[in-house]
Image (cartoon, rainbow, N blue to C red):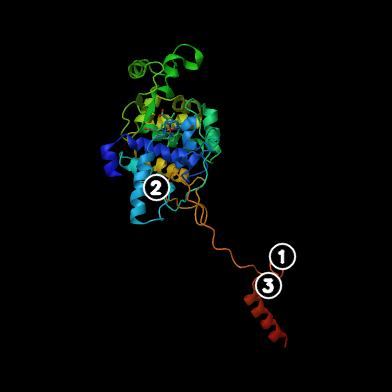
């Protein structure tokens, strides 16, 4: 991860987001990595996930792990560990997450809008999406702090610059100077450019996101919506004025670990995928056993002759 992020620092945000979008839909079981098939459109092809990035990094990590210890590390754990490392390598907290997640065997694009809030979600919608995952208002405002790193495409927020709610003007909750900067980055209908989610420093895991929000420099509508609830608003303003990251880091570590357990498959559930983008092939059927007379058909208690025979002899001797 150190090498990967040294070459492409942009991927830190992408990999952190990958863990979130994985966990919120079907749980942290790598359903986001599965490819669509002829008869199924998978999560990664849902419109809300069209800009999710970092799949090739997970494939590279999986390839190395399979070479070293085949069949041991799940794709879901690789996503979680890559997110953890992305945070730490962006100067964020070192979070002691657990492992043991296993991979699921399904993925459906139709699950995505039911589980991931859109970029223009209101505070009511955000709270309700998070509550469905047993996450509180506190978790919402803390986990949104992940937007201290990474980028968003212009199309994810440009309505706020050019045509907010169909008004033909900009969102009044967007600082005027910041608007000017953003308009230079994003022309109307720009489908390509990316802009840092944190107006101050989009590569360091710090308090810049909250400071920006408190000054009307939040990029997404869903970020600004955090100002509309007492609990989330208080937290934003508190962290914006904090002169140490200690408290945010400690809070983030806790909420991140809770998020990383949502719907995780453990023990005998799920599988360890060999390739992250496809489920394992079904095991080849074992050679069919020779027919057993009087077993299933008759419903006899002795489903296999030798053990039934031994039990019978045992009872005879007991009786005798
Ligand atoms: C609260 C609800 C959330 C909404 C509505 C939301 C929405 C978005 C959107 C629209 C983008 C930009 C996508 C693009 O245009 O390319 C984004 C990026 C990002 N999100 Fe969120 N997000 C939410 C919560 C979270 C959470 C909980 C995390 C992680 C714990 C997270 C981590 C990120 C990161 C790191 C990026 C940057 C991705 C990159 O650089 O490619 N988000 N999010």
Q: Residue at x 37, y 26 (%)?
A: 212
Sequence-wise, the earlier of marks 1 and 2 is 2
Above or below: residue 168 compared with residue 131: above
Answer yes or no: is residue 253 visible: yes
Question: For numbered disc 2, what is the local secondary structure?
Answer: helix
Tell me the quarter of the image containing the N terminus: top left
Sequence-wise, the earlier of marks 3 and 2 is 2
Name the residue tied to disc 3: 302
Residue 315 shown left or right of residue 275 in the figure:
right
Displayed-image quarter of ligand 1: top left
Question: For numbered disc 1, what is the local secondary structure?
Answer: loop
Q: CA distance from mark 1 to mark 3?
A: 12 Å
Name the residue tied to disc 2: 78
Sequence-wise, the earlier of marks 1 and 3 is 1
In the foreground, 183 or 312: 312
User: Mark 3 touching mark 2, by CB under 8 A?
Assistant: no
Name the residue tied to disc 1: 297
Crowd rating for badge 2 (residues with CA inside 10 Å; few <14, some 14–19, many 20+): many
Q: Residue furthest top?
A: 168
Q: CA distance from mark 1 to mark 2?
A: 48 Å
Q: Position of residue 37 (x, y in %)?
A: 50, 39
Question: For numbered disc 3, what is the local secondary structure?
Answer: loop
């Amino acid at each position: 991860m150190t090498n990967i992020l040294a070459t492409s620092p942009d991927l830190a945000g992408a990999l952190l987001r990958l863990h979130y979008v994985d966990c919120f839909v079907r749980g942290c079981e790598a359903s986001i990595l599965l490819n669509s098939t002829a008869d199924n459109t998978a999560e990664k092809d849902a419109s809300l996930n069209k800009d999710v990035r970092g799949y090739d990094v997970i494939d590279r990590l999986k390839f190395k792990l399979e070479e070293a210890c085949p069949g041991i590390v799940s794709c879901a754990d690789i996503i979680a560990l890559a997110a953890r490392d992305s945070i730490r390598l962006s100067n964020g907290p070192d979070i002691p997450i657990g492992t043991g997640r296993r991979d699921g065997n399904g993925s459906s694009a139709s699950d995505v809008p039911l589980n991931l809030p859109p970029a223009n979600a209101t505070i009511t919608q955000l709270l309700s999406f998070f509550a469905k995952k047993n996450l509180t208002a506190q978790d919402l405002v803390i986990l949104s702090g992940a937007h201290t790193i990474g980028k968003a495409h212009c199309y994810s927020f440009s309505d706020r610059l050019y045509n907010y709610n169909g008004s033909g003007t900009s969102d009044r909750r967007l600082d005027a100077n910041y608007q000017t900067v953003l308009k230079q980055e994003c022309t109307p209908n720009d489908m390509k450019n990316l802009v840092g989610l944190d107006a101050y420093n989009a590569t360091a895991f710090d308090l810049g996101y909250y400071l920006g929000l408190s000054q009307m420099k939040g990029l997404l509508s869903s970020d600004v919506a955090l100002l509309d609830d007492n609990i989330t608003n208080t937290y934003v303003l508190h962290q914006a004025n904090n002169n140490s990251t200690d408290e945010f880091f400690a809070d983030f570590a806790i909420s991140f670990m809770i998020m990383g357990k949502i719907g995780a498959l453990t023990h005998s559930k799920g599988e360890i995928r060999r390739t992250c983008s496809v489920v394992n092939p079904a095991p080849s059927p074992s050679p069919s056993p020779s027919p057993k007379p009087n077993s299933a058909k008759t419903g006899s208690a002795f489903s296999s002759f030798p053990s039934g025979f031994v039990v019978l002899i045992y009872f005879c001797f007991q009786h005798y």
